[in-house]
Image (cartoon, rainbow, N blue to C red):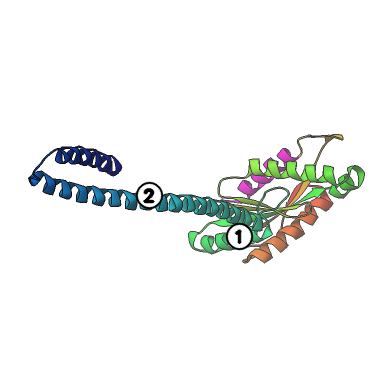
Amino acid sequence: MVAACAEQLSSVNTVLKDELAGQNQPSGLEEALEKSESIECEVQAVDDQLSAVNHALEIEADLRQRLEQQLVTVTHEKAAADHAAVHDPLTGLPNRALFDERLKQEIAQVKHQGVTLAVMFMDLDGFKKINDTHGHDIGDAVLKIVAERLKQTTREGDTVSRQGGDEFLYLMVGIGDNQDTILLAKNILNAIQEPCQLSVGELIIKLSIGISIYPKDGTTGPDLIKSADKAMYEAKQKKSGYAFVQ
């Protein structure tokens, strides 16, 4: 708009100059022309300044856009790094560090709520034979299937994690009595034992579960996990599927 005004002023001033050139005696028109030409110069100067400002703004806008893109990239990379730090890379389940932290938090809460919680230590039966017979790729595929089935049976508020190898941990919160825990354990066992369709054919996976109850079997996270681990070995020996701490 400023550039258009400067052009219009220039056109008007040209007409005025032509008229003055045809007059024998200068009049007030000459003074008006001088003022108009002065305004034309000022408007043109403003136009030049605005062009410079617009150019600088374009550079700044481009820089801001690139910085915002870099920020998005860094944010995504940080989120991915944070997720990777507390999740198992193979199954995507929470890892032991995240499980321990959640267990610690839940223990602190149940102390004041008058409810209890259970820790399940789960181990696949005969997993070494699967690896030895079919290879580690099939073994990894089995672990992924088990992890997905555990996710599907996880109640809201509970946490299931991969301890390492073929071992998994389950944190069950807000339980009323052992029957709640037994029902969940049976649901998990049934889900895991569904046939797995793999490239080597159909496999049946079985699981042994050891269960510890807070505060009867331990008042700290490590104690509860240790107790559940012990109960899991009893379930494996008896081939009972699950066992509570004796």
Q: What residue type is labelled 1?
A: Leu
Quadrant in which residue 201 is drawn: top right
176 in the magenta segment: yes
Q: Give the range drawn in magenta.
A: 175-192
Which residue is the site of mark 1? Answer: 103
Query: Label for residue 54?
Result: 2
Q: In this view, does 175 lie above or below 100?
A: above
Quadrant in which residue 26 is drawn: top left
Q: Where is residue 217 in the image (x, y as percent from the top left)?
A: 66, 62
Q: Which of marks 1 and 2 is nearer the N terminus?
A: 2
Q: Is residue 43 above or below residue 113?
A: above
Q: In this view, does 175 lie above or below 105?
A: above
Along the line of sight, which residue is nearer the eye, 42 or 52?
42
Along the line of sight, which residue is nearer the eye, 43 or 166?
43
- Quadrant for the N terminus in the image: top left
Q: Please, what secondary structure does the residue beneath circle 1 have?
A: helix
Q: How crowded is mark 2: few (under 14 residues within 10 Å), some or many (20 or more)?
A: few
Say if residue 213 shows up in the picture.
no
218 in the magenta segment: no
Q: Which residue is at a point 56% across and 49% down the rendered structure image?
A: 157
Number of marks in the image? 2
Q: Which residue is at a point 38% across and 52% down the rendered structure image?
A: 52
Q: Which residue is at a point 64% across and 64% down the rendered structure image?
A: 221
Quadrant in which residue 96 is drawn: bottom right
Query: Label for residue 16?
Result: none
Q: How would you classify the magenta stretch by its main secondary structure?
A: helix
Q: How crowded is mark 1: few (under 14 residues within 10 Å), some or many (20 or more)?
A: many
Q: Which amino acid does label 2 sit on?
A: Asn
